[in-house]
Amino acid sequence: MDVMPNQLVRMLQLGRAEDALRSNAIWICVSCQTCSTRCPKEVDCAGIMDALRELSLRRGVVSPDQERVVAFQQAFLNNIRRNGRLDEIELIAEFKLRALPHERSLGFLLKDAGLAPELQKRKKLHLRGEKVDDRAVVRRIFERCADGEPK
Amino acid sequence: MKIAYYPGCALHGSSNDYEQSLRACLGKLETELQEIPEWICCGATAAHSLNHKLSIALPARNLALAEQQGMEEMLAPCPMCSMQLLKAEKLMSGDASLRKEISSVVEAPISGKVKVVNLIQVLQKVGVERIKAAVKKPLAELKPACYYGCLLTRPPDIVSFDDPEQPSSLETLVSALGAKPVEWNYRTECCGAGMTMANEDTVLELSHRILTDAQEHGANCLVTACPMCHVNLDMKQRDIERRYGARHNLTVYYLSDLVGLALGIAPENLGINRHFVPPRRAEAAATQPTATGAVASSAAPAAKV
């Protein structure tokens, strides 16, 4: 983490929002909620992280080092928008394609491919993910929540 | 007891061993799960990271669907789903205009009467004493490191479950099964959660620390109630060992695996044979409680805190 959660809050207090939005920290954060839970001043640092991520993406100032994480989260939401539920194989495929321009390596594309037969062996691989029947309502929910979202 | 059930994507995906396990376990305890028809994904980290409104609307839709079924209590075994559902309700309960807005977004009324619970709470409702009385095969050889992870107890003002720093509900349950939980330091540390693919380095590092601490405190297995923790600690364990040149070899059980085993359910009916790190000495001993000397004697007593 280039900036610790408490430092991120201080940054915002000092009016350096731009630095916070461009930080790696907001995408490295795994949302474990420890900072919010332990803050003696009851600052919801994890909630601030969420807000910063959303703003960072909307303003197009995501740290170039963190494109992979963003690609994953975007692929995840697209998947839900289409299916209502997560289709894991589709998610991995879209994630890899979205992240490939930043990763630029064949290794990245093929990484985890070896996991498929292991999952298959354990009946954990679903070649076709579940979809809800009423996918139209899911799309409408997404549309109604899309104000300000980058295209 | 009949309870609404929100499986979430993981339990219908690559964590389907968790669903198998909890269905077998709760079935044995006469708890019937009624799956919510047409449930949708809670949005998980992707939604709360990228779109605040969506992170309320997606779980809220499921609360509305549960309500339509006339259910008052809903089990969400995945702590991520559970936290998202509870957060959505908490935000709406403090803001009538938000409740109205979200109801209109999800095209269904949400009155707030559905109570979301985790697996531990369901087992507590069944009753620790009742479970203890039903034990057929005490897990006397098991020294589990009870691993809570992040979202079972955090954030406390949303999940209102157990103590976020010193939880004890898992230890209480596994002790009732005859197991001897160890004292260790990483019970509520994060394993990296849903960043398994997006940020593998972080996941491997955090999970390695958890496995190492469990091992150093004499655990011969881990127990979790979270599908994401299970993926990181079980499925990624060989990768962790390779990366750090370590040997952990710790079986990672779902809570329902241990309850099920103690109740006399066969490991394969709990899906334990579908884990990545196979049960070795620990589980062999657990299913044959009379066996002695099956557990490594080098396991240190849990004294360090």
Image (cartoon, grey):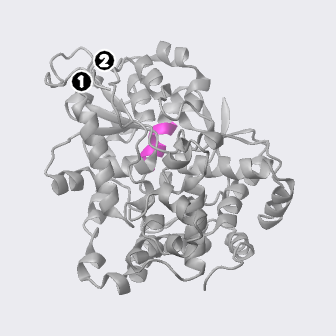
Residue contact at pointers 2 and 1, CB within 8 angstroms: yes
Q: CA distance from mark 2 to mark 1?
A: 8 Å
Indicate the position of residue B204 as horizontal and vertical percent values.
Answer: 29, 55
User: In the rendered image, which residue does mark 1 sit on?
Assistant: B285
Residue B180, can we see it?
Answer: yes
Write the residue at 39% across / 65% down: A2
Give the magenta-colored segment's residue range: B16-23
Image mark for residue B140: 2
Write the residue at 39% across / 23% down: B262
Mark 2 lies on a secondary structure that is loop
Question: Taking B273 as reference, is B19 left or right?
Answer: right
Chain ID, mark 2: B
Label 1 sits on what residue type? Ala
Residue B234, can we see it?
Answer: no
A6 in magenta: no
Q: Residue furthest front?
A: A14
For label 1, the crowd category at 10 Å Cα-Cα, with few meaning under 14, some 14 to 19 and many 20 or more, is many
The prevailing secondary structure element of the residues shown in magenta is: helix
Write the residue at 47% across / 68% down: A128
Disc on the earlier residue, 2 or 1: 2
Quadrant position of the C terminus of chain A in the picture = bottom right
Label 2 sits on what residue type? Ala
Asked where in the image residue B107 lies, by quadrant, the reply is bottom right
For label 2, the crowd category at 10 Å Cα-Cα, with few meaning under 14, some 14 to 19 and many 20 or more, is many
Q: Nearer the viewer, residue B185 or A7?
A: A7
Question: Taking B243 as reference, is A65 left or right?
Answer: right
Write the residue at 46% across / 39% down: B225
Indicate the position of residue A135 as horizontal and vertical percent values.
Answer: 67, 71
Q: Nearer the viewer, residue A29 or B294?
A: A29
Q: Is residue B135 above or below residue A9?
A: above
Mark 1 lies on a secondary structure that is helix
